Image (cartoon, rainbow, N blue to C red):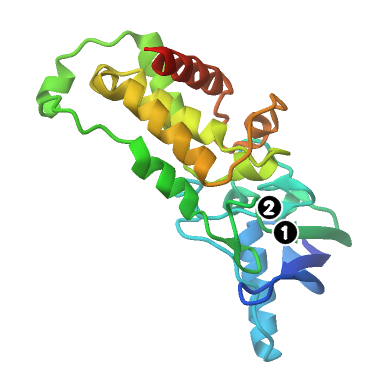
Amino acid sequence: MTKNINLTLKVWRQNRSRPKGGFEIYNAKDISTDMSFLEMLDVVNENLIVEKKEPIAFDHDCREGICGTCGAVVDGQAHGPQKETTLCQLHMRHFKNNETIVIEPWRARAFPVVKDLVVDRGALDEIIAAGGYISAKTGGPQDANNILIGKEIADEAFNAAACIGCGACVAACPNASAMLFVGAKISHLGLLPQGRPEAKKRVMSMVRAMDRLGFGNCSNETECEIQCPKAISIKNIARMNRDFVKASVS
């Protein structure tokens, strides 16, 4: 049943030109519980614009949990309290009337704040550019369809490929590690025949790029898996570590 609720928002405000930011408090009144979290922020911004105040900057695009563009820490949790849910899929029915919600950007040295809740996640693109692709000649689409792949391997590759690169794993990790992201990208290519010729080169290049860009190391806290909106398994980190060791000694 639809109802309206009132909320108090503590939102992090910061501009790239300012080294320090801070929380500002806003009242979100008559918010429909049918709204998504981003729609709620739209309403707040519309009111701020009417009041001739600077609206809250936040990333968004498809708003369907596909693109990986949106993301913020809500009450200390990346993408909010709902499991396997992106911020754009989080609905206001999961919050209570008169509740105070704390909203912050991803916190990581490799993700500098651009403005308010917007961070620069270009470091993830640099990791992909370092080796997250297939350049070996593997034939056309018809050739790929002729290669038999076991269902178990196909399922593991597909599940790893579900990563949308949102950066929630980095934000959730106490070390700001990107190993779940990198492990997923390495797994979804390396598990398939077309990706195996460059597997050793790929894992070495991507792991080195991750370290160079300032991401932390994995300490098996598992927050990354818990907060991942696509439920990417930390088994991909173990697989990446094994592949890296093999590539290092071969």
- Kindly give the residue lying farthest to the front in the view shown: 249
Where residue 49 appears, as percent x and y from the top left, is 64, 86
Q: Mark 2 points at which residue?
A: 107
Q: Residue 19 carries which label?
A: none
Depth check, mark 1 against mark 2: the one in front is 2
Contact flag, marks 1 and 2 (Cβ < 8 Å): yes
Q: Which residue is drawn at 63% across and 33% down?
A: 217
The quarter of the rendered structure image containing the C terminus is: top left
How far across and down, in percent of the image, does residue 62 sit? 45, 56
As drawn, is 28 to the left or to the right of 88?
A: right
Q: Which of 110 and 184 is in front in this view?
A: 110
SS for tag 2? loop
Q: Residue 104 carries which label?
A: 1
Dot 1: element: strand
Depth order, front residue of 155/17: 17
- 183 sits to left or right of 16: left
Residue at left offset 49%, top offset 14%: 242
Q: Position of residue 149 (x, y in %)?
A: 28, 11
Q: From the viewer's side, name the closer residue of 72 and 250.
A: 250
Mark 1 Cα-neighbour bin, 10 Å: few <14, some 14–19, many ≥20: many
